[in-house]
Image (cartoon, helix red, strand yellow):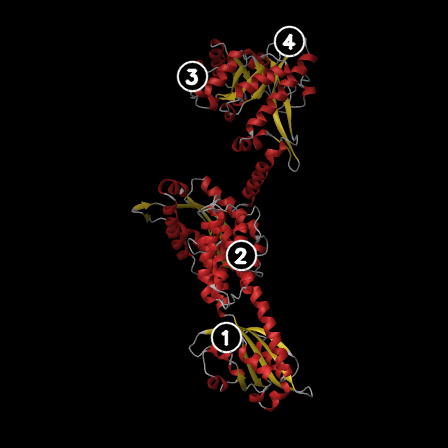
Amino acid sequence: MSAGPDGPEDRLRRFATIWSRAVFPVTSTSSTRPEFEEQLLPLARRLSEALRARAFDADEGRAVGAALIASHCTDPEALSRSLDCVDAYLVLYCGDGGDQEDLRARSGRLQHAMAAGFAQALRERTLAEQEAISAAALKAQGVVAQALHDTEARFRAVFEGAAIGIGIADLAGNILQVNGALLRMFGVSEQAIRTRNVKEWTHPEDAPQTWKLYDELVRGEREHYHVEKAFYRPDGTVLWTNLTVSLLRDADGEPQYQLALMEDTTERRLLNLRLRYEATHDALTGLPNRTFFFERLEKALGAGEGQRFGLCYLDLDGFKTVNDSLGHAAGDRLLVEVADRLQSCATAPGEMVARLGGDEFVALTTGPDTEREVDELASRIMNVLVAPISVDGRELTVRGSIGIVEGPAGERSPAEVLRSADITMYRAKSAGGNRFELADEEADARAITRHGLTTALPTALDRGEFFIEYQPLVHLGDGSVRGAEALVRWLHPQHGVLGPDRFIPLAEHTGLIVPLGRWVLEQSVRQARAWRERHDDAGPFRINVNLSPCQLTHPGLVQDTVDILERAGMAPDALCLEVTESALIGADDALLKPLRRLADMGVDIALDDFGTGYSNLANLRRLPVSILKLDRSFTQSMQRFPADPVDLKIVEGIVSLAHSLNLAVTVEGVETGAQAEQLRILGCDTAQGWYYARPGPPERLHELALVDATG
């Protein structure tokens, strides 16, 4: 650390100073305040290093909590003040340069670890003190039998000076003597407490075995027992203790007295409850958080036979717009109001609302009839979101999408239930939002498969799981193979061979379509060269490769294509790039520019699926295309005999228009010889379809079936 002015060491020292000033008044140390600060400085340094460490280590926080006990900070108030200082100042003085949100989260985890370390060290210290007291009491048990006021001096010193409460009673429960610490814990005089019998000190929260253990001890059947027990003070408040009761025997081994050692844990219990609340509740809205929700969901799913559960997973529609336009503070106020409204929807037994994070909330209902109840719960949620929410003088309309999962307990894990609800919620959002949908196992399975494919896509290309099949393009005039269309496939390890319809949209969504498309182009051009070398007397040959609309906007499209052709030693006219009609009709000049450059080089551009969109035929003149590829829908009616004369006229008109614009015409989906002949008569140039060959490996490209595929 730098020692310069206002450097990290100075800020660390400032943090230690603030910490020592806050805690020193509640310590029992004999040191001065500056000396105490020097003791805290290395602890502050450990917290600072743990805050900024690459990997979080909770042991550092626990060690600091334990070190407070060693520094005589045994009062629970010392821990409470320490946690407040860490919460307010650790990130401020020691978190320079880091992500503030991440640092605050780490600070919270360090506070929890400190509390755990403090409690464990205090417990160990108290137990050691209890053992010393028990040993002294046992040494003095002979004289205790004669008269308590003549008790051995050593026992008296321990008895009166101990920080924990000590009481001695006979086996009938009559209290004989108590020390000052116990009187202070109860807030009563010795006379008042000695009028009480041990058996009167019951409390509603006593563990079931507490008084059973007591009876066994006074009968001489056990030597001691330890329980956590609550007592009522005279003012009605509750005193929580760690209580250890031991049996004292006389010289002959006969039971004679009972010795109670009490450690006041009230403050620690309240602190633990506070920490538990903070760990299980959302700091912004006060709703149960993800941790608490999963505990409740796990309990609901583990309920007995006949029990069911219903879960509503809510995501606010358009919340990001509020955050972006009005700021995060306004977004937080909106979330608080939404949380209050949701809380009012889940008031029946077995219902709860939680915030998972961001603008995502869940509502859970349990019981034997959740099929009806969860629908009513979802309807209540939608209804409370109808009224506008006022934020900074603006009336904001909030809507939500809800995914509902309902079913019997014991069949699914919490993670599976939440995943199904999440998938269903996104289905509701995709349907326009402001609605709720019920989970559907088949839809879930499809979504899970899509997610799995999306996750596997990036590495599938590196693992060599993609391959290409080729379907021949046949000249309708002489029946020769003039080219082939490259069709990519994915050999998935679990799902087998997947067609492009299963993964191309996912590749477009993730951006993988660019490297995948480049790979397909490179492999196809290499294959085209191999065919030319093998069939050099077969006339002109062209390879057709599909181009995704996403690839059109990639700045490297033209250069990649040029590099691939040059490396393979192929002329540009050996390549045809197929682009769907929907991607080009209405496209602006910026989108058409790379295609024009490729067309100027000699690469053919085909307008794929022509006739399926709202084509403006006048636009064909401005597109850099040389081939129209008619969709298979035009050829379906030609499977019947006679063919529909209207369809024939439409195809004839398209072919005539295309030829007048110097465009060639290719037809997809040819499945019979009659179709092929009719298309030849109408003037189409090339065709492809199962009549000629199905897509297959490159070595079978020239094996034409010429068999009607309709059966």
Q: Which residue is drawn at 42% across and 60% down?
A: 347
Residue 419 vs residue 612, the one in the foreground: 419
Confirm or deny contact between disc 2 and disc 4 (CB under 8 A): no
Amino acid of disc 3: Asn
Residue 369 vs residue 214, the one in the foreground: 214
Residue position marked by numbered label 1 in the rendering:
204
Amino acid of disc 1: Pro
452 relative to 76, above or below: above
Amino acid of disc 4: Gly
In this view, the mark in front (1 or 4): 1
Checking the image for residue 619, the label placed there is 3
Q: How crowded is mark 4: few (under 14 residues within 10 Å), some or many (20 or more)?
A: few
Q: Distance between the residues labelled 2 and 4?
A: 84 Å
Checking the image for residue 539, the label placed there is 4
Q: How far apart are marks 2 and 1 (CA)?
A: 41 Å
Residue position marked by numbered label 2 in the rendering:
43
Q: Is mark 3 on a helix, strand or loop?
A: helix
Ranked by sequence position, the earlier of labels 2 and 4 is 2
Q: What element carries label 2?
A: helix
Residue 247 percent coordinates (x, y) = 63, 81
In this view, the mark in front (2 or 4): 2
Residue 27 percent coordinates (x, y) = 49, 66
Q: How far apart are marks 1 and 4 (CA)?
A: 98 Å
Ranked by sequence position, the earlier of labels 3 and 2 is 2
506 relative to 702, above or below: below
Q: What element carries label 4?
A: loop
Q: Could you tell me which quadrant the C terminus lies in?
A: top right
Ranked by sequence position, the earlier of labels 3 and 4 is 4
Amino acid of disc 2: Leu
